[in-house]
Image (cartoon, rainbow, N blue to C red):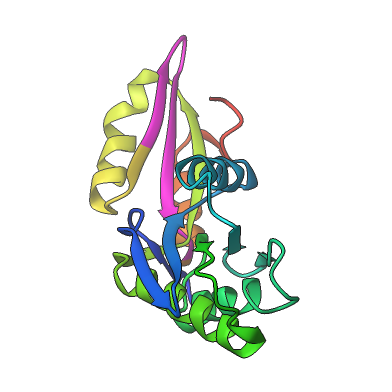
Amino acid sequence: MTKDTFKTLAVASPEALYKEKGSKFYAYAFPIDSEEGINARIKDVKEKHYSARHWCYAWQLGIRNTMYRVNDDGEPRNSAGMPIYGQIQSFGVTNTLVIVVRYFGGIKLGVGGLVKAYKQAANLTLKNAPIIEKTIDVLYTLNFEYVLMNKVMRIIKEHQLEITNQKSALKCLLEIKVRERDAKKIETILNSIFGLEFIKGTSEF
């Protein structure tokens, strides 16, 4: 059976500090779910460390079809972003952004020294991050008459499904979250209820 869980961060990690020959590397790890969220986090860190020399980062989004990006921000090619991304891979997390801010200490570290420093800084912040395992879920929008409410709620309770949204109008609209491995079984049950319509996704809200 295809794995339907993934690891990510529960919340942002505390600030981590790594020092090397006078240079200071402040590292942060954030849970993310969109590129817009990534840009907002980077902007916040740049504002906090406005006098720093470099703001390097790496991120990964997605579960099965992942995408990632690395940024050396003026450091020698592959000396910052890739070592940071290597730590995201090492911890096995996704939907994660790691930013490492460098204050130059007056002594050049060389490419090897930079690779080590950015790797260690990223490692420190991810070690401090609360990592959790989450399920891959499918959303369904249910549309039904109120007379079916008790029957629908019984199914939701029996199978421990989560209601993520609801709307009251002429009919009842419910959005429910179903673990991916249980989706086919729940679809079969929903199909057996006469008068209930459902669609995969959340177009009604």
Viewer-closest of 54 and 87: 54
- Write down the region rendered in magenta: 164-180
Q: Is residue 57 above or below residue 159?
A: below
Q: Is residue 172 above or below residue 86?
A: above
Viewer-closest of 28 and 10: 28
Q: Can see residue 196?
A: no
- Whether residue 190 appears in magenta in the rendering, the answer is no
What residue do we see at 64% from left, 85% from top?
A: 110
Q: Is residue 120 above or below residue 56?
A: below
Give the image quarter of residue 31: bottom left
Q: Is residue 179 left or right of residue 110?
A: left
Q: Residue most toward the right? A: 77
Viewer-closest of 51 and 158: 51
Residue 98 in the image: x percent, y percent?
Answer: 50, 63
What residue do we see at 62% from left, 74% from top?
A: 80
Viewer-closest of 120 and 148: 120
Residue 50 in the image: x percent, y percent?
Answer: 53, 44
Q: Residue most toward the front? A: 106
Q: Is residue 12 left or right of residue 76?
A: left
Q: Can see residue 174?
A: yes
Q: Main secondary structure of the magenta part?
A: strand
Residue 61 in the image: x percent, y percent?
Answer: 60, 60
- Whether residue 170 appears in magenta in the rendering, the answer is yes
What residue do we see at 51% from left, 74% from top?
A: 88
